[in-house]
């Protein structure tokens, strides 16, 4: 089954997580999904395996940018609109299957770690809030979602049988050595793990190359052809939802249509011009475009725009580097030095450079609704339960769901 993923540098669209959770507008999210569906369909993609429903309870979690915040009801409403946009009026020949993840919610991980790796294998529910995390997943089942990817933690593998949900279940590994994928099955051989995945009801095994093991299990082991046929039928229903799509010409990619509908040059990026939060402005005013000239060297410049990432602990490994993790405390000396250098600080949420510059030059006002708290001190984060919304009453960097204006 052809699929597009935002983790790939060649993905045809920009990541949708930031855009959606700041908009807090189901109609806008549906329109976004409709545009992406047109683009993916024109390029020949039949599956979009990148929509996360995890509730943002743990501020240290590396994937907060991929979801719609801590509100389960809002997340449920947004994901239903998202699915409707990808599927259209019922799943059919012109639909793209929207895969959702990570059932039953992957954010409440111990110490805010990433569950893709062995150090993020433990999911905690100290606030007994497990049922709240299920709300968006119940909504997508009712909305007839086509596929679901399970979480990798101990609680899922030990307590939840994926086949209870019915439909298409996926497994994902990204082709790297990540022991968390064998959580609770470390004692099994690799073929035995593949068998366990099949017995759990999974259909595709994403980004993994275990064809030889699978073939051996079919010809010489305990996997029957009937079991594989079940997965094949499910997968083909996604790739060929209509008999009219059984010829090669009917599913051929259309580059001209892809370019015409590309969200990289359409109105969608312009809609994200507003999201942005001024953290420190010190009575600064927008620049006037007419007075700005770009120079070649820093020595000639009166003003420099620096884009920096939030400080975090570095990790090795190609895949691990994709996820920032941990918290780096800045010293008082460093903070004092930074305060002398910058005149203003903005936090952005995945906006395009053009959108950001529109704010800098006063053509748009920065505003957005952040769907979770960002406390100022790490002690507040460490004191909270991972599975409940933050209820911190001390100083914040940003406040959830408050609308900001310059």
Image: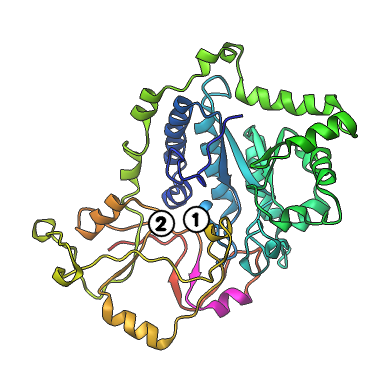
Indicate left or right for 289 with 65 as reference: left
Up-down relation of residue 195 to residue 125 (above or below): above
Q: Quadrant of residue 185?
A: bottom right
Badges 1 and 2: C-beta atoms under 8 Å apart?
A: yes
- Which colouring convention does the figure follow? rainbow
Secondary structure, mark 2, is loop
Q: Residues within 10 Å of mark 2 (few under 14, many from 20)?
A: some
Query: Residue sitting at 59 percent across and 52 percent down?
Result: 72
Q: Is residue 375 magenta?
A: yes
View extreme (left): residue: 291
Left or right of 6: which side holds 225?
right
Where does residue 305 sit, x and y in percent of width and height? 26, 65
- Horizontal side of 273 relative to 225 (left or right) equals left
Can residue 24 be seen here? The reply is yes
Query: Where residue 300 sits in the image (x, y, percent)?
Result: 14, 69
Residue 316 in which image quadrant: bottom right
On screen, residue 270 above or below 313: above
- For disc 2, the marked residue is 349
Q: Residue furthest bottom?
A: 333
Q: Secondary structure at mark 1?
A: helix
Instruction: Provide residue 263's location: percent of width, then percent of height.
Output: 37, 37
Disc with the residue nearer the chain's start (1 vs 2): 1
Q: Quadrant of the C terminus?
A: bottom left
Query: 50 and 89: which one is in front?
Result: 50
Disc number for residue 159: none
Residue in front for this viewpoint, 307 or 137? 307
Residue at the spot 27% in from the left edge and 82% down from the top edge:
340
CA gap between label 1 and label 2 equals: 8 Å
Q: Position of residue 92 (x, y in %)?
A: 57, 21
According to the picture, the residue beneath numbered tag 1 turns out to be 65
Q: What are the residue bounds of the magenta stretch?
A: 373-383
């Amino acid at each position: 089954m052809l699929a597009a993923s935002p983790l790939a540098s060649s993905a045809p669209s920009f990541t949708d997580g930031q855009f959606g959770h700041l908009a807090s507008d189901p109609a806008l999210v549906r329109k976004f999904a409709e545009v992406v569906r047109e683009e993916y369909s024109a390029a020949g993609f039949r599956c979009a395996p990148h929509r996360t429903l995890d509730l943002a309870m743990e501020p240290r979690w590396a994937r907060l940018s991929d979801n719609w915040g801590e509100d389960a009801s809002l997340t449920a409403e947004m994901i239903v609109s998202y699915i409707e946009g990808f599927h259209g009026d019922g799943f059919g020949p012109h639909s793209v299957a929207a895969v959702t993840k990570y059932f039953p919610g992957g954010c409440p991980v111990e110490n805010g770690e990433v569950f893709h790796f062995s150090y993020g294998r433990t999911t905690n529910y100290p606030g007994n809030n497990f049922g709240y995390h299920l709300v968006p997943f119940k909504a997508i089942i009712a909305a007839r979602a086509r596929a679901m990817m399970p979480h990798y933690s101990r609680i899922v593998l030990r307590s939840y049988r994926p086949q209870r949900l019915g439909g298409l279940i996926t497994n994902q590994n990204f082709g790297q050595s990540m022991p968390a994928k064998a959580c609770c099955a470390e004692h099994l051989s690799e073929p035995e793990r593949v068998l366990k995945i099949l017995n759990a009801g999974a259909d595709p095994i994403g980004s993994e190359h275990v064809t030889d093991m699978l073939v051996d299990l079919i010809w010489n082991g305990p996997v029957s052809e009937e079991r594989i046929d079940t997965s094949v039928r499910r997968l083909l229903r996604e790739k060929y939802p209509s008999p009219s799509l059984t010829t090669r010409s009917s599913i051929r990619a259309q580059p001209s249509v892809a370019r015409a509908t590309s969200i990289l040059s359409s109105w969608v990026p312009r809609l994200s011009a507003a999201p942005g939060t001024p953290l420190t402005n010190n009575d600064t005013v927008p620049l006037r475009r007419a007075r700005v000239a770009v120079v070649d060297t820093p020595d000639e410049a009166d003003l420099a725009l620096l884009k920096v990432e939030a400080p975090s602990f570095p990790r090795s490994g190609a895949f691990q580097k994709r996820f920032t993790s941990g918290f780096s405390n800045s010293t008082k000396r460093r903070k004092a030095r930074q305060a002398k250098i910058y005149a203003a600080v903005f936090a952005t949420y995945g906006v395009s450079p053009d959108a950001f510059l529109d704010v800098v030059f006063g053509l748009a006002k920065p505003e957005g609704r952040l769907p979770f708290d960002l406390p100022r001190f790490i002690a507040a984060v460490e004191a909270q339960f991972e599975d409940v919304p933050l209820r911190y009453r001390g100083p914040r960097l940003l406040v959830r769901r408050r609308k900001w204006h310059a």
